[in-house]
Amino acid sequence: MNRTELAQSVQTATGLDKKQSEAAVEAVAAAIIGEVKAGNRVSIFGFGSFDPRARGPRTARNPQTQATVKVPASKSVAFKPAAAFKAALNTKGRASAAKKAAPAAAATSARAATAKASVAKASAAAGKATAAKVTASKATATKTTATKATASKAAASKAASVKAAAPAKAAKAPAKAAKSARKR
């Protein structure tokens, strides 16, 4: 939106004619510029504030020639939007920001509780998975995370099967070593 479009918006909102609305926009802009130029802060409730900023003199470097250049002191302005302005930008059609804040806080706490629960489940599942890592397959891993009682029974039976399977693997190992020795 440019200055002319702003003047047309003021015209339609207030019922002023075109010249009066343009004059109103010009007067507001001139008043803000004049106060900031004088070093005063301009605050418009519900919209924001214009703060004058002063930059001191400094030396800079020209990137092409690497020569040092003196930059003189300058003045600038910073705009900080009001809380109502920010809320209006972020409501997505809702009536007020207060209505949005209450469900958002509840949703945040609910998400935090869900996250804590999922982290606890993940750490419990990780502990179970590391205990049964030797012989666990994907299908048995999903069965062990269903409930704690079932998982502990399954872990006990898996531990027994691991102990029984271990001698069989040890017996195969010398045979493999013998085969590799024959191939050499």
Image: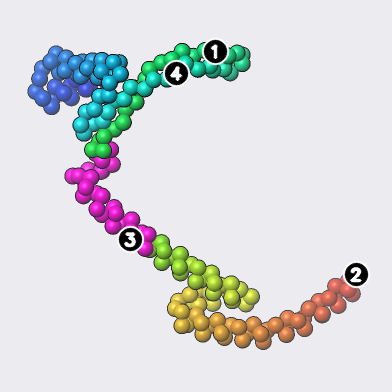
N-terminal of the two: label 2 or label 3?
A: 3
Residue at the spot 10% in from the left edge and 17% down from the top edge:
17
Mark 3 vs mark 4, CA separation in Å: 49 Å
Q: What element carries label 4?
A: loop
**Can residue 22 be seen at all in this image of the molecule?**
no
Per the image, the residue denoted by label 3 is 110
Per the image, the residue denoted by label 4 is 56
What percent of the width, then of the height, locates residue 95? 18, 44
Query: Do the CB atoms of the residues marked 3 and 1 lie less than 8 Å apart?
Result: no
N-terminal of the two: label 2 or label 4?
A: 4
Label number found at residue 184: 2
The three-letter code of the residue at mark 4 reads: Gly
The three-letter code of the residue at mark 2 reads: Arg
Mark 2 vs mark 4, CA separation in Å: 81 Å
Query: Do the CB atoms of the residues marked 2 and 1 lie less than 8 Å apart?
Result: no
What percent of the width, then of the height, locates residue 62? 57, 16
Q: Nearer the viewer, mark 2 or mark 4?
A: 4
In this rendering, is residue 167 above or below 179?
Answer: below
- Residue 87 is covered by the magenta coloring: yes
The three-letter code of the residue at mark 1 reads: Val
- Nearest to the observer: residue 113 or residue 167: 113
Q: Is mark 3 on a helix, strand or loop?
A: helix
N-terminal of the two: label 4 or label 1?
A: 4
